[in-house]
Amino acid sequence: MLTDKQRSIVLNEMLEKLELPESAYIKAKERYDSLGLWFDKSECKKYNPHIFPQGSFRLGTAIRPLDDKAEYDLDLSCKLRVGVSKESHTQKELKQIIGREVSAYRSVNGIKAPVEEKHRCWRLEYADELSFHIDIVPCIPAAAVRQRFLFESMRKAGETDILATNVSQLAVSITDDRHAGYASICDDWHGSNPEGYALWFEDRMSQLRSVLEARAQIDPVPSFKLKSPLQRVVQLLKRHRDQMFKGHEEMKPISIIITTLAARAYKGEADIGIALHNILNSMDRYIAAHAPRVPNPVNPEEDFADRWNMPEGKKANLEGNFMRWLVQARTDIDLLNTANSNFLKDHIEKRFMLTLNAAELSKKIGIVDEEKQEVTPQFHVIAHQPPKPWRQ
């Protein structure tokens, strides 16, 4: 069995292979800044626009895709902070305001692919040295009454007043062309809070209150060179999930559930291996028996696992496959403690699709593999191959 130090070396070797190339972060930052400057000088300037990243780039949990030729994606929000409200504009009008500027930006910057309209966003497709697309979600600040409701909901859920205050003030209302009132004046737009979720995640990540300090209005893409154990754990879990469900993507656990449960289970462990073990063995305790099963921490009435009980979710057996993935992940992570570099190399390639050099790994962790050594895992193996996702 490996020592904690040896295990950390193995995990860091895996994470080095898993991390996005520096060029991806640089390119994302360049494109994000460029869009921010465009909106600041465009006709939208009168609306006091705020462009900010969301999703895995914002959280610092982005990973390489299984297919190296796959596109990278950066999710952004464009919040118009003045001059647009639910009383003055429809969702469609707000989306068109943002869409016109995105189209103008595309034309001026020589982007060949046309702007693509999605249900909630506009997509810019880049096709240069690094395949990249950016999804831009139009939004406006949530009404004061909504912010107050979210504040009270978070306090009731056990969050501190300061966190609930800071998070609730970042809530937004977004556009969605599937909404019944999309083209008419109405007050029941879909709500979201990607900035608030990032703030909550950072609070869980650091377990410090310094993350709640006021922020600049153009928020930087998170540093990719300094990562907390929680971010690293989420990256490893997402990769294991991607490999286990390769070819069955419609049945895999979604990232927001993995990220939220991992953050709930994280207790500030400084060692990645210890954090990974503890999170895996306790994250299912934060799944409620009744709806909301996996509450959105910044909007406790929202259930990230709501699709589990929908017809298509039951057909894909989303809940069952989440539990199967969790059991398999526990086994596969435990086997990373095996003190045999050849076994580790093969195991990591099969379960994580990451290629390590056995000889180099052996040297780094300070173990000598005997020729033809037979590895006897110290943990029960559920199956030689990960169980296939199954439908009901």
Image (cartoon, rainbow, N blue to C red):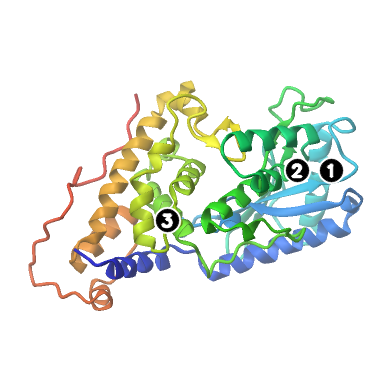
Residue 111: image quadrant is: bottom right
Q: Earlier in the sequence, mark 2 or mark 1?
A: 1
Residue pointed to by mark 3: 233
Residue 345: image quadrant is: bottom left
User: Which type of secondary structure does the marked residue at label 2 adopt?
Assistant: strand
Q: Are circles 2 and 1 on residues that touch, CB within 8 Å?
A: yes
Q: Which mark is residue 97?
A: 1
Q: Are circles 2 and 3 on residues that touch, CB within 8 Å?
A: no
Marks 3 and 1, Cα distance to the nearest angstrom? 39 Å
Camera-side residue: 376 or 180?
Answer: 376
Marks 2 and 3, Cα distance to the nearest angstrom? 31 Å
From what the image shows, is residue 383 above or below residue 351?
above
From what the image shows, is residue 281 above or below residue 374?
above
Residue 321: x %, y % from top left: 36, 35
Amino acid type at mark 2: Pro
Residue pointed to by mark 2: 138
Nearer to us: label 2 or label 3: 3
